[in-house]
Amino acid sequence: MPTHPDISSPLRLSLDRAALQHNWQSLARMSGKAACGAAIKANGYGLGARRVMTHLAAAGCRDFFVATWAEAQTLMPIASGLSLSVLHGVRTEDMAVAIGGAARPVLSTPEQIARWRQAGGGACDVMIDTGMNRLGLDWQSDVAGLVNGLKIEVLMSHLACADDDNPLSALQRQRFAALTQQIPASRYSLANSAGICLGADYHFDLTRPGVALYGGVPRNEATGKLRQVVTPQAQVLQQRVVRAGDQVGYNATYTAQRDTPVVVLNIGYADGYLRGFSGTGRVLAGAAALPVIGRVSMDLLIVDATDAPDVGEGDWLDIDYDLPTAAAASGLSQYELLTGLGQRFERRWV
């Protein structure tokens, strides 16, 4: 991001507010009778959590989730009628902020529960581990006894394999459903983005989409229902001709077979456009798709401009960043593609 008001960045993210809101509304419809929340951790998956929260609240979202109390603090004050939960619970270091704050902890260990009780904490959420073996109270333990007396707003678990057809998803749903009969809470929540696609049995009272809000396609059932939200754009620094037989970029991995016009863009792996796009990525100049040639550098990218002869220094080009397509091209997950976008981008909502 620019450090002086008179200095602009040669990198920007074009962020589509209408597409973000459309995606939430689509996921809300897919959630059926369940309320649809939004995971806005990791700075809103790289888009800017405060703006994402504002835009989704305007679309009707009321339940938001971040990972840490540091993330929660950047969103204060929270508008009336909105709910914010902190997924990583409360460490000792978090208690001064958490007690009496506007956000709720998602308690996931006996120690966190004891810490919350001892401090006289009020309403909270609770995470149950039903088979992922990540955060959460062990579903096989005396969960009802551990949480007895807590004012639980949301009892939740997290699906490990909802983006494929692993039988663990059904087993997790079965275990969680049994716990909902034993543990009183205002609402119950299991489904992430992919879990929403699994159908009504997984929705319970509240769904918690993340990547799908931002244009990720978690399962085939969501294909055609979601829109691209994020388009990285980079400025051309130089236009040149690589002569036949000359090499391009680090380690000379590409050799020009003919005299080839190329443009050099102000973007690289330090910005989150990682080396997995070397020789596989594309840059868009209007209707022309220009292939990335050679290796992606830390700050620079070289593309074959044969099909865009009029592109030159100072022009802005779009990076082909449709998430499923970019994931296939780079070998990265759709989550990494979003959260890895760097701070040198100027983020522009349109």
Image: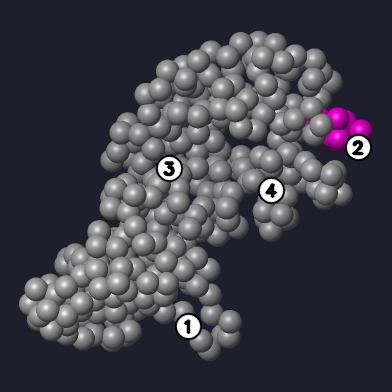
Q: Secondary structure at mark 4?
A: loop
Residue corresponding to mark 4: 68
- Residue 270 x, y percent position in the rendering: 46, 68
Vertical comparison of 251 with 17: above or below: below
Left or right, 259 with reference to 275: left
**Res 8 label:** 1
Residue corresponding to mark 2: 119
What's under tag 2, amino acid-wise? Ala
Name the residue rendered at 58%, 82% in the picture: 3
Q: Secondary structure at mark 2?
A: loop
Circle 3 crowding by C-alpha within 10 Å: few under 14, some 14–19, many from 20: many
What's under tag 1, amino acid-wise? Ser
Residue corresponding to mark 3: 212
The quadrant in which the C terminus is found is bottom left
The image quarter in which residue 120 lies? top right
Of the residues under marks 4 and 2, which one precedes in the sequence? 4
What's under tag 3, amino acid-wise? Ala
Please give the range of residues in magenta: 113-123
